[in-house]
Amino acid sequence: MSETITPVNDRFGGFVSVRSRERLLDGLRQKGIDNECVLNALARVPRHDFVEEALKSRAYEDTALPIGYQQTISQPYVVALMTQLLLTGRDRLERVLEIGTGSGFQTAVLAQVCASVFSIERIGALAELAHYRLEKLGIENVSLRHGDGTNGWRTKGPFDGIMVTAAPNRVPDSLFAQLAERGVLVAPEGSNRQQRLLYWVKKNGIALRHQSIDVVFVPLQPGQA
Ligand code: SAH
C-alpha cells in the first residue's frame, strides 16, 4: 500500500506521515488507552520533534528510542498509560511533578492535561534541549530544573500528580510527602532489568499501592551530570 506523506504542523519544518500518527493512536486504543484527554494529548504533541533527525521516521513506532547520554525517550504506550494512571479518570490536573525530563516528550504530553508541570532532569544537556524544544512548540506551562530529582521539588509542592520516568529500587518517602490528598504517584520500581510500573493514590494521608505492567526504564541515578 502506498503511503501519503503529508507535512504536519511542526515548527521544525520536518515531514512525517499523518497516517503513521493515526496508526499509533489506533494501536494505543487497542491496548486499552481509553481516556480521550490522554489520546488527544498524544495526538497534539509531535513526537518527531523530540528525537534526533536520523530517528524522525521512526517517531510513530510504538517503541522507546535512544536520545543520547545512554537515555531513551519512552515508548508511546508507556507514556499514554502513565498519563492515564496519573489522571485516574479525571480530565485535568492542577500541579504535576515529573522526575526525569529526558527528551521532554512526556513533559509536553503532561502540559496538555495539567495546569502546571514541574520537571527535573539530572543531565544538563538533556534539560537544555528539552527546554528549547518545549519553547519552540509554544508550551509555556512547564518549569524545568536541572538537578537531582530523587527527593522531588519540595518548594513547589504539594502536587496532585507525581510521575517518575526513571526507575528507583524503591520510591523515596520524600516524594509521598509532596503528594496532595487524593493525589496519584506513578513510578516504575525495581532493579535494572526487572521493574514493575506502580501507582499510589493518597487517601486520608495514606498512599495505597496498585500494580500495573512490567516495564524497562533507565535507572534513577543520584546527583547531576
Ligand atoms: N520521559 C522521558 C524519559 C527519559 S529517560 C522521555 O520520554 O523522554 C529518564 C530520564 O531520567 C533520563 O533523562 C535521566 O537522565 C533522568 N534521570 C535519572 N535519574 C534522575 C534523577 N535522580 N533526577 C532527575 N532526572 C533523572
Image (spheres, helix red, strand yellow):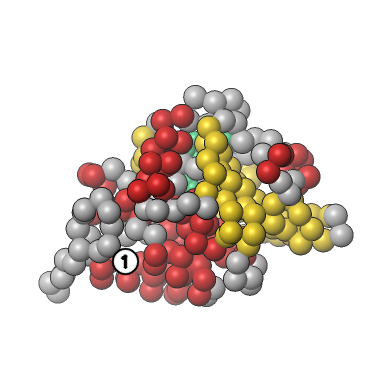
Horizontal side of residue 151 vs 130, given as left or right: right
Asked whether the viewer can see residue 146, the reply is yes
Horizontal side of residue 164 vs 159, given as left or right: left
Looking at the image, which residue is at 58% across and 54% down? 116
x, y percent for residue 7: 20, 63
Name the image quarter holding residue 26. Answer: bottom left
Q: Is residue 154 above or below residue 96?
A: above
Asked whether the viewer can see residue 208, the reply is no
The residue furthest left is 2
x, y percent for residue 101: 50, 43
Q: Is residue 48 above or below residue 3?
A: above
Q: Is residue 31 above or below residue 155?
A: below
Residue for badge 1 = 21
x, y percent for residue 94: 64, 59
Q: Nearer the viewer, residue 108 or 38?
A: 108
Category of crowding for the residue at label 1, using alpha-carbon neighbours closer than 10 angstroms: few (below 14), some (14–19), many (at least 20): some
The residue furthest right is 204
Q: Nearer the viewer, residue 164 or 192?
A: 164
Residue type pointed to by label 1 = Arg
Q: Nearer the viewer, residue 157 or 32?
A: 157
Q: Is residue 16 above or below residue 143?
A: below
Looking at the image, which residue is at 23% across and 44% down? 53
**What SS does tag 1 mark?**
helix
Looking at the image, which residue is at 61% across and 36% down? 149
Q: Work out which quarter of the rendered image holds the N terminus and state it.
A: bottom left
Tally of numbered tags: 1
Label 1 CB sits under 8 Å from any ligand 1 atom: no
Looking at the image, which residue is at 57% across and 51% down? 117
x, y percent for residue 62: 37, 59
